[in-house]
Image (spheres, helix red, strand yellow):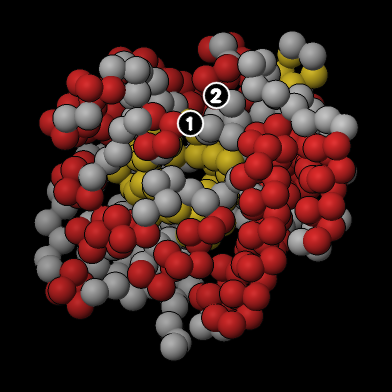
Amino acid sequence: MTWAWTTSRALPTWSPSPGSRPRMPRSSNRDARKDTRPVARPGAARVRDFHGVYVPVPTPFRGDQVATDRLKANLAKWNATDLAGYVVLGSTGEFPMLSEAERDAVLVAAREAIPRGKAFLAGTGANSTLHTIRQTKRAAEIGADAAIVITPHYFTKGFAQAGAQVRHYVAVAEASPIPVMLYNFPLNTGINLEPDTVARIAEHPNVCGIKDSSGNIPQAAHVIHLTPKTFHVLVGSAAALLPALPIGASGGVLALGAIAGRELCEVYGLARDGRWEEAKAIAARMMLADRGVAGRFGIGGLKAALDLQGFYGGPCRAPLGTPDGDAIEDIKECLASAGLL
């Protein structure tokens, strides 16, 4: 099986016409439908191409303080890879643990360290539409290229309704100076964005895609089928990357990318070139680290792995724990088995 990809990434303005962005082939029924998305209002969005592998950046702490110097140093190392960009203040970045001032400090430091050739997505989701809009506007002021907005998840019963989800995201997209990407993480939030609901939200011209951390490949395929080609579907786990690419996913926001960025970019590139057997071999090796590090020890395990690789991982913010002793040895052995040490 061979897919033919185009390689152009030039997107100076929002263009809702089919084929305006490179992606893997999708169903002929979907391609044949006319794209009826409205034209974006002037200045509404700085549209980017969101293909490739992205890292959700861990927030480094030194004691009780955010270590912005360590954040910049880590980003400088990741910048030397083919990573397409970064999600700052995502789940891996422990965003619920940070104060407003700390969030600003992290975003400012990230903007200073991320080159313009790599996408900078800022997590701006909150439990109210008002605060989500405020945080999104602040991220835009600091220089984020797009906002990634997790579902409000405290009042789960109320926000589980499709109408509430549509109202929230459309209001945020309408107010945002930068493109908005949905963030679906039902394991953490207790709320799943259904494909039909995502398709309704995607009609807004300032909604650019979704990070789908459900791990549900058939659901991702349904979203891809229902939405325009200009709508990017990024999976949220390394295990989902390779299965999702042939059905039209644009790439992934992958925590494993923090410690295996080069390898996951290689998987993506090989898949793009139709070299599936080679891609599968590398992906299978990376799953050893995916299961044995973050899968077993969570964010703390990922940070410990960063320390072992010469990055700065440091501690998590309590109550999240940080591995030590035998756990560190297990992580070290896992990294070595995957060829990451």
Residue corresponding to mark 1? 123
**Label 1 sits on what residue type?**
Gly
Mark 1 surroundings: few (<14), some (14-19) or many (≥20) residues within 10 A = many
Q: Position of residue 190 (x, y in %)?
A: 35, 30
Q: Is residue 338 above or below residue 47?
A: below
Element under disc 1: strand
Element under disc 2: helix
Judged left or right of residue 329, residue 270 is left
Q: Is residue 215 above or below residue 177?
A: below
Q: Position of residue 137 (x, y in %)?
A: 40, 23
Which label sits on residue 95? 2
Q: Quadrant of the C terminus?
A: bottom right
Q: Which residue sits furthest front?
A: 326
Q: Which residue sits furthest bottom?
A: 1
Q: Could you tell which of marks 2 and 1 lies nearer the N-terminus? A: 2
x 69%, y 58%: residue: 288
Cβ–Cβ below 8 Å for labels 2 and 1? Answer: yes
Does the image show residue 163? yes
Q: Nearer the viewer, residue 192 or 127?
A: 192
